[in-house]
Amino acid sequence: MIDVSKHYCPNKSCSFYGKLDSGNIRVGWQYGKRKTWMLICGRCNMRFSERTGTVFHGVHSPDDKVMKTLQLLAEGNGIRASARIMGVSTNTVTRWLAVASQHVKEVNDYLMRNLHVEECQLDEFWSFIKKSKSMLIQKTRKNAVLETFGRGRRLAAEPRS
Ligand SMILES: [Zn+2]
């Protein structure tokens, strides 16, 4: 079965939009090769895939892992330290940060509700992200260029996942 408490209604005009664990999400059926769950919002009847109503739609890592990393950062750990603790590369953390910065509300909700991060920690967290964001992006681009040249390949678009 699937844990619906991590999903929210993706319908922006629904009163339950973005709200986690509100009891409005029903489990529908499975489809496709990967047995993806179809979920239904009981409020507006919107049907959506389990990959849609999560904070990190399109990131191929479990939300938990992403969120725990963000929690570490919110608690004042650096990017390198957090990456080491979670067993991922600093580039991965950088990418998650970039995604997180586009979902401020959802990330805040999740961190506060599920990981009990304090509001003041979140303020610090976002100001940290704001400060380091441009630096991070530059770094990522540089790494992408170096990696690409290292393999003797032509410059490709920045890898996304
Ligand atoms: Zn809805």
Image (tube, grey):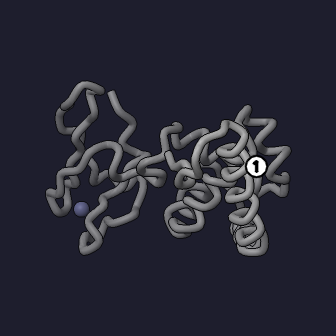
Horizontal placement of 102 versus 131: left or right?
Answer: left
Query: Residue drawn 59% across and 52% down?
Result: 155
Work out whether residue 126 can be spotted: yes
Given residues 9 and 126, the one toward you in this image is: 126
What x and y, as percent, mark residue 42?
19, 54
What x and y, as percent, mark residue 75?
80, 55
- Above or below residue 43? Residue 127 is below
Horizontal placement of 36 versus 83: left or right?
Answer: left
Query: Residue drawn 51% across and 65% down?
Result: 103
Given residues 89 and 109, the one toward you in this image is: 89
Residue carrying label 1: 72
Given residues 111 and 83, the one toward you in this image is: 83
Horizontal placement of 76 versus 97: left or right?
Answer: right
- Above or below residue 11? Residue 67 is above
What amino acid is at disc 1? Leu
What x and y, as percent, mark residue 72?
76, 49
Which of the 4 image quadrants contains residue 130? bottom right
Q: Which quadrant holds the N terminus?
A: top left
Which residue lies most toward the left here? Answer: 45
Is label 1 in a helix, a strand or a loop? helix
Q: How many marks?
A: 1
Query: Residue drawn 71% across and 69% down?
Result: 133
What x and y, as percent, mark residue 128?
78, 69
- Above or below residue 118? Residue 32 is above
CB at disc 1 and ligand 1 closer than 8 Å: no
Quarter, ligand 1: bottom left
Q: How many C-alpha atoms fall within 10 Å of the one at disc 1: few (<14), some, or many (≥20)?
A: some
Work out whether residue 70 can be spotted: no
